[in-house]
Amino acid sequence: MKLCGLTGGVGMGKSTAAGFFLGLGVRLVDTDDLAHELVEPGQPALAEIRREFGAHLLGADGRLKRAELARLVFADAAARTKLERILHPRIRERWQAEAGRWRQEHCAVAFVVIPLLFETGAETSFDRIICVACSRAGQEARLRARHWPADQVRGRVAAQLPIDQKIARSHFVIWTEGSVDNHRRQVEAILGRI
């Protein structure tokens, strides 16, 4: 099995690319989805976040106030590091377990969407790495469309390697400045080469 990492900057089109790969029948897990699962009520990671950051980050229903936590950690590098120590090992354990199942099923190709692939030192786990990228202006426009505050946009972008470094360390690049159809064609071409 060829295990591929799909990475890129925040707001650059990773989810769209992942959707195209899924549509082509590949197995895929998104680490953002795993992170959401890990902070559901009753999960050990949520209890650890509560202990580390305070009960005020949980709503009356016991759910994590994700936007409030994001504001905190993207404004404070030390807080972000604490959160990453809680979540990243658990996320890695889950996607590696999924990759193990795919190997047992003799899948030909599978993907892990992992925005912080290089930042977490995960590159050695993958046979091929695909970076989804666009210009800084395109990225900023997409993030503004999400109605994120400017300081949060800056914090999220600063938490990741610059996109040119991700591109340089990847085997393939999907450039998302063009049409969605162009995005899809790049995905198809890359899958054909893997």
Image: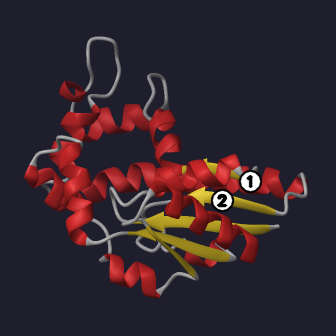
The residue that disc 2 covers is 111
Q: Nearer the viewer, mark 1 or mark 2?
A: 1
> Which quadrant would residue 140 be assigned to in this image?
bottom left
> Which quadrant would residue 71 be assigned to in this image?
top left
- Is residue 185 or residue 4 the one in the foreground? 185
Task: Give yes or no for contact between labels 1 and 2 (Cβ–Cβ under 8 Å).
Answer: yes
In the rendered image, is residue 105 in sight? yes
Q: Which mark is residue 78?
A: none
User: Crowding at label 2, few (<14), some or many (≥20) Cα neighbours within 10 Å?
Assistant: many
Q: Position of residue 123 (x, y in %)?
A: 56, 76
Q: Secondary structure at mark 1?
A: loop
What kind of residue is marked 2? Answer: Phe
The residue that disc 1 covers is 26
Residue 147 horizontal side relative to residue 100, left or right: left
In which quadrant will I find the C terminus? bottom right
What kind of residue is marked 1? Answer: Val
